[in-house]
Image (cartoon, coloured by chain):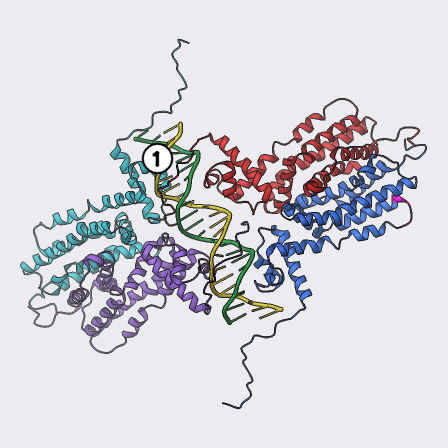
Chain colours: A blue, B red, C purple, D cyan, E green, F yellow
Amino acid sequence: MRGEATTGVRGSPAPRRRLDRAKREAEILDAAFYEFAAKGYAATRLEDVARRAGVAKGLPHFYFERKEDLFRAVLRRLIVPTWIDLVEASLTAEGSTRDLMRATLAMVYERLAANKKAREMMRLLIAEGPRFPELTELYHSEVGERAVSIWRRLVTRGISRGEFRAGPILNNPHVIYGPVLMAAIWQMLFGRRHGLDLDSWFESHLDLVLNGLERPKRGGRG
Amino acid sequence: MRGEATTGVRGSPAPRRRLDRAKREAEILDAAFYEFAAKGYAATRLEDVARRAGVAKGLPHFYFERKEDLFRAVLRRLIVPTWIDLVEASLTAEGSTRDLMRATLAMVYERLAANKKAREMMRLLIAEGPRFPELTELYHSEVGERAVSIWRRLVTRGISRGEFRAGPILNNPHVIYGPVLMAAIWQMLFGRRHGLDLDSWFESHLDLVLNGLERPKRGGRG
Amino acid sequence: MRGEATTGVRGSPAPRRRLDRAKREAEILDAAFYEFAAKGYAATRLEDVARRAGVAKGLPHFYFERKEDLFRAVLRRLIVPTWIDLVEASLTAEGSTRDLMRATLAMVYERLAANKKAREMMRLLIAEGPRFPELTELYHSEVGERAVSIWRRLVTRGISRGEFRAGPILNNPHVIYGPVLMAAIWQMLFGRRHGLDLDSWFESHLDLVLNGLERPKRGGRG
Amino acid sequence: MRGEATTGVRGSPAPRRRLDRAKREAEILDAAFYEFAAKGYAATRLEDVARRAGVAKGLPHFYFERKEDLFRAVLRRLIVPTWIDLVEASLTAEGSTRDLMRATLAMVYERLAANKKAREMMRLLIAEGPRFPELTELYHSEVGERAVSIWRRLVTRGISRGEFRAGPILNNPHVIYGPVLMAAIWQMLFGRRHGLDLDSWFESHLDLVLNGLERPKRGGRG
DNA sequence: TATGAATGAGGTTTCATTCAT
DNA sequence: AATGAATGAAACCTCATTCAT
């Protein structure tokens, strides 16, 4: 029984940085996305995720019971709060549909085809979709369907203002979107060695679409 | 350097049917494609490949030293002798470029977007490309580049015959191809529950492209 | 790149006693030595090592990435902190070189020829040396070279004190050591059924060596 | 029904070189020894043995039911018809025992310590002995015991001729042999980088042994 | 006899998951 | 809340052995 106040060594380690759950969770999700994107679902090791997040091996399991849950959370977070809100919002703009089409396409190129993270996310979805059908379902309702509606609204707007002609495109307005997706996938596959010039591609795309949609002006171009 | 790996004495009789190497190899490749397509590279078990091929666990290793080699062989076989030969051949046909465009697009839809095997193969390439860069490289030279050239030839043919107008599309003629790819991917992702009507999609696509490319007729369509 | 390698849900409770790394590592090394010595490198199963150490199959891999690393660690631990320090220390003793020679030889017999563990270690080194050249190299510098120096010092001491005669033995003083090694190997090979009487062997050896080295006394023994 | 004598292509391959069993067996044993010596028993692949012998993978099993049988046959062939016959024969020579000792040691050095194949065989025996006790037993009776008898005969001869003194060496005459074995093992372990000068070693050994055994001449060397 | 495709047990290694600390 | 040692199922791969040809 000594009376001195103990000063120095304590058994417990230095108080670790203590973030609130949400922040910590976000860190893990970020790390997980990086790893999943780089290696795919099955080949990703939770230990690597943990290391990248700067936490101990066991911690991801604390936040996400199993690996699949983590994967779902990663994708869900990326699918939901999507750029598509922005695009939808932009549709209320005034002015010619031709201009709106250009603006919309430009926005989509920027958010999707030119955005590495978005492309990686798409890659994950394509790769792992069959094993996570709820995720594709989610993507369909959050992105797919809304994209269809966007292009439909644009085409319809053009027609009702007399700028565009009516035609079969109305049945599948998202055909318009095809070259964007193609650019994204081309970059995804061949980007490292045979990347596209996205600006030039954009112009080609826009030119094709506008000419394909617009009513020939009187007197014609000929 | 392994210890005695075997017991030697085996009980089962085993159907020791013997094929020539090429046939057996093809069987294994078929089985492997099926499994890889269903589960992805990492999640595919060689034992399942063997079972599906109707052979013993060790046989795939006899034909393909390691799993990666098998995967490479599977994809290579699908990439190289591709439908694209057919398409190229068809370009020499006579007649209007409009008709040729329709025929070509139809062919491509049939071979790619409407063909499950082709789609699965693309899924594998997208999913595993980063880990098998030689394969994407091969795909680029065997398919990507040739596709560009096909669309360029078509557009050029149309222009030189006075059917199509010149324009930015010449810089990226494969923009035309975008909706095909999109259809393929849409089916790949959402096909089970939200499949496209490919015929209708094809008509929309063709309409957009032809209107986008063709010179306005005198007097206009208006 | 493996598919999901695990089931996750496990039934067994498992005694999850936890030691500090060093202790646990030592347990594994001990178990590994036992198994390697009994069966040789290639024929040893890591699972047996684990079982002998009382841990799960995967734990040895946690401490030693691969089997070879474990093997190296096992041998290194046995080579380095060797009995040879003791022998070297003993050389500073006073008294006749004859007595010192007897004491030294006795020590060496005890540590090497009469010591099962030391013999097993030597067997491993002989057996696997070609595949682990760094280990033989280590053994050479830690044991071989120092042994040479020990015998040289002994012989030189004897000569400079007028006890021993000079002669060719100075070129290879470790010739003296030969019978020790022979005894060790004899025991190693034939010990079970035709073991040597090491005490008697020691006396024969000592007698030969002393008579071989000492200056004949005046008047001779005859 | 054609009448022509078929000339060219026959189904059967060119008649293979057909050696009599003994020769073929010897080839396999040679190849097997090479492989076993290089890698040890467990790490040796029968396929490599076959390849080295220039035969098909299955053939070794035709001559030697299992791998262990092959190994036994390899060692047995090397153990039995050993150099030791020669040495024994040489013991009947006339002349001084000193000379005979030199000649005998020289012979043993040449056959064992300086002979790579003999060393490799010893390595195999040391390495695999515990798993093939009949082989060590065989080696003991064919080599071990006879070696003891050789050295005993030599020492006895020296004593009975008044050249050598009696002493404890008579209990373990093979102590004399120790440095030979040591040289062999030293070469086996360290030969590649720190090989002994065997001639010099031999002289040191012989000098020690003769001085250790011989009666001091009257008047002494002192 | 001889070949080499085919089999399948078993070894090493990986890694999701658990849980004592 | 957090750590990281420990577990053990399962995947890849090896290779002795068999046997149709």
Residue at image point 54% right, 89% down: A4
Where does the image place residue A67, in percent across and percent down from the top left?
Answer: 60, 56
Q: Judge whether residue C159 can be spotted in this image.
A: no
Toward which corner of the image does residue D4 lie, by quadrant? Answer: top left
* Main SS category, magenta section: loop
What stretch of residues is rendered in magenta? A93-98
Q: Chain of mark 1?
A: D
Q: Judge whether residue B114 can be spotted in this image.
A: yes
Amino acid tagged 1: Val
Residue at image point 61% right, 35% down: B79
Residue at image point 83% right, 28% down: B163
Where does the image place residue C86, in percent across and percent down from the top left?
Answer: 30, 72
Asked if residue A57 lies in the magenta stretch, the reply is no
Toward which corner of the image does residue A180 lie, by quadrant? Answer: top right
Nearer to the camera, B84 or E14:
E14
Q: Residue furthest right?
A: A219
SS class, disc 1 = loop
Asked if residue A96 lies in the magenta stretch, the reply is yes
Q: Which residue is mark 1?
A: D55
